[in-house]
Image (spheres, rainbow, N blue to C red):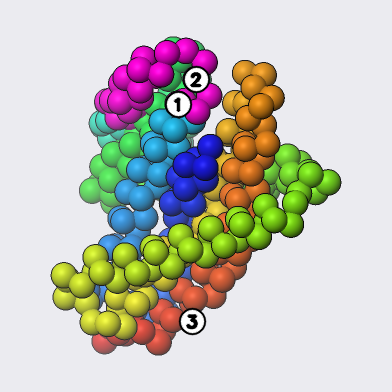
Amino acid sequence: MERLSRAVLAAVSPEVVIPLLCNLQTKGSYGKAKGIPTIVIAAASFDDIVAISAFGVLLNIATSTGDLKTTIIRCPVGLAIGSLCGLAIGLFLRYVPYQDDTRVTMLRTLLLAAGGMFLMFGSATIGYEGAGPLACIITSFVASNGWRLTGKQAAERNFELLYTIIQPIQFGLIGIEINLFVLEGRMVGLGVVSLLASLAVRIAASIVVAAGGNLNWKEKFFVSFAWFPKATVQAAIGPVALDEVRKMHLEEYEAYATTVLIIAVLSILITAPVGAILITVLGTRLLEKEEQ
C-alpha cells in the first residue's frame, strides 16, 4: 500500500497549473518565447498518465486475492486495453461529428462524456478497472488535439463548466471519508515528511532534466516549481483504494488504504495553495516577458 501513496503523490494537478500559466500569458506572455507553458503542461499531462496507470497496476496487485503471477500478467494487458480503446475512441471523436455541423460543440461534448462513461463502466465490467481512467485520458487527449487543428475547442469550455459543478462534490466525498478520530499524529507527521521529501526530489530531478535544454537557471527553477501543485488527481484517485478494500471486504487493508487517503488530502492542503502562490509570484520574476 505504501507504493500506492507514491503513485498518488506523483501526479500533478492540471486544474491548478494550467489556469495559472494561462493567466501569466494574459499578463504578458511570460516564457512563451521558449515554450515554457507548453513544456510544463505537456509534461504534467504525461506525468498524470503514468501516475494513474501506476496507481491502477499497484492497486490491482495489492488487492488481488488470486495468483500473483496472473495478476502481474493482467496489469500490462489492462494498460494495453486502456491505451488502445482510448486511442480508438479519441480518433473516432476527432472526425465525428463533422466539424462544420452546426451542433458540433454540443455533440462533441455529449459524445466525449458518453465515451468516458462507457470506458469507465466497461473496464470495470470486464475486470480491468485500471484501464478505464487511462483510456479516458488518452481519449480526451487525442480528440482535443484533433479539435485544436480545426480551431474549434468550445467543447473544452463545456467540460470546464461541468467540472465546476462536479469539483465541490468530489472534494466533499473525500471529506466524508476522513475520520478525525482515527488520525494519529505520527501518521500525519510521517505523511507530511514523505510529501516534503518527494517534492524535494521532484524539484531536484526537474532541474537536472531541464539542464539539457536552452533554459536559463531562472527558467529551470520555475519549471521545477510549476509541477508543485497537487489537487484534482489526488482527489480522484485518493479514495479509490479505500473503496476497493471495502468492496472486497479486506478489513486487514483498511488502515493502509485510509493512510493513502490521508496522504492524498495532505498533499492537496499543502501543495495546492503553496504551488499556486509560487507559480503566480515566480512566473513574473523568473520568466522573460515577450515583447509585443
Q: Which residue is drawn at 35% across and 69% down?
A: 204
Main secondary structure found in the magenta portion: helix
Query: Between disc 3 and disc 1, whose residue precedes?
Result: 1
Magenta highlight on residue 25: no
Task: Pick out the residue farthest to the right.
Answer: 181
| Residue 240, position as x, y percentages in the image | 58, 34
Task: Name which residue type carries label 3.
Answer: Val
Crowd tier of the residue under label 2, counting other residues whose Cα lies within 10 Å: few below 14, some 14–19, many 20 or above: some
Q: In this view, does 247 lie to the left or right of 79?
A: right
Q: How far apart are marks 1 and 2 (CA)?
A: 5 Å
Q: How far apart are marks 3 and 2 (CA)?
A: 46 Å
Q: Which one is nearer the viewer's eye here, 100 or 146?
A: 146
> Relative to residue 153, is residue 92 depicted above or below?
above
Give the residue displayed 68% in from the left and 36% down from the top.
255
**Residue labelled with disc 2:** 64
Which disc number belongs to residue 281? 3
Secondary element at tag 2: loop
Please tell me whether residue 136 is drawn above or below residue 216 in the rendered image.
above
Count of residue discs? 3
Where are the magenta residues, as a range? Answer: 60-86
